[in-house]
Amino acid sequence: MSGRHRDKVRPTVADALEPMFDGARVMVGGFGLCGNAEALIAGVVERGVKDLHLISNNAGNLGKGLAQWLRAGIIGKVTCTYLGNNQDLHDAREGGVVDIEVVPQGTFVERIRAAGAGIPAFYTPTGVGTVVAEGKETRDFGGRTYLLEEALHADFALIRCRAADPFGNARFWRTARNFSPLMATAAKTTILEADGLVELGAIDPDDVHLPGIFVHRVVEVTDHEDPFEYRTVREQRA
């Protein structure tokens, strides 16, 4: 294994997060509590950085995941798609301690994809005639009005995968993939939390969900809580 491959692997979460700084724009993968980079999220709190601009779908829930950042008071702004029943996020907004930008989920994803593809902005019909359109440029195409939305970049992306090799080629676990591959392309530095580290070449090229060229640091974390937000089961009738 060459040195350039080994250079990406960090022995601890603290080592992986060494570049993190105050005021950084940080994308974090996960949908609800699914696919959360649990160790990296906790490690950011321990690192003591503050005034972060968090870019994530919903900023945790039930006091878990990214809700830890809200409770620690290290977030200055959140760009998300959903507040839902995340009481920590509601409290932060009502208390005026966090600036919240709510973005339609499709627009959120496309803004991230555009950043990774080098596209500075794009037009979309989503949000026309609503509060989403306030202060934004509009233009008509084919008799329909569209909003101009800018690409969404970040300084860091913190994401989790099921398996990764030392170069950062990654494979995710089903729906836990969610926003993570796109976030990795849109960030200056991608830090990958892998459930398991495998040898270079162990992941078949057709099974690579995220090429290692977009990954800068890899840390193996084998122990996760993986909590359920709400367990729903079907009752069996006699």
Image (cartoon, rainbow, N blue to C red):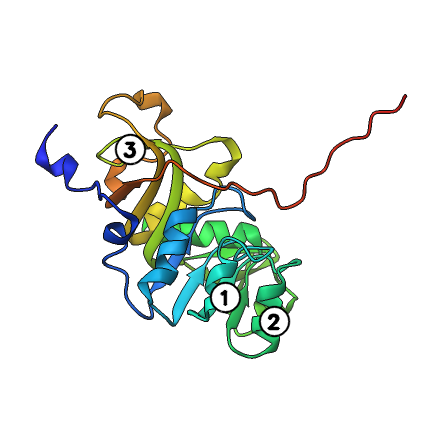
Q: Earlier in the sequence, mark 1 or mark 2?
A: 1
In the rendered image, the residue lying farthest to the right is 238
- Secondary structure state at the residue bearing disc 2: helix
Say if 72 sits above or below 207 in the image: below
Q: Amino acid at mark 2?
A: Asp
Q: Residue at x 10, y 31 (%)?
A: 2
Q: Residues within 10 Å of mark 1 (few under 14, many from 20)?
A: many
- Which residue is label 1 attached to? 70
Disc 1 and disc 2: Cα gap in Å?
A: 9 Å
Disc 1 and disc 2 in contact, CB within 8 angstroms: yes
Q: Which residue is mark 2?
A: 91
In front of the other: 170 or 36:
36
Q: Position of residue 39 (x, y in %)?
A: 39, 48
Can see residue 212? Answer: yes
Instruction: Give the quarter of the image for residue 87.
Output: bottom right
Amino acid identity at mark 3: Asn
The quadrant where residue 90 appears: bottom right
Residue under circle 3?
169
- The spot of residue 237 in percent (x, y) is 88, 24
The alpha-carbon separation of the residues under discs 3 and 2 comes to 38 Å
Camera sees residue 120: no
Three-letter amino acid code of the residue under disc 1: Leu
Residue lying at 47% horizontally and 50% vertically, measured from the top left: 110
Position of the C terminus, as image quadrant, is top right
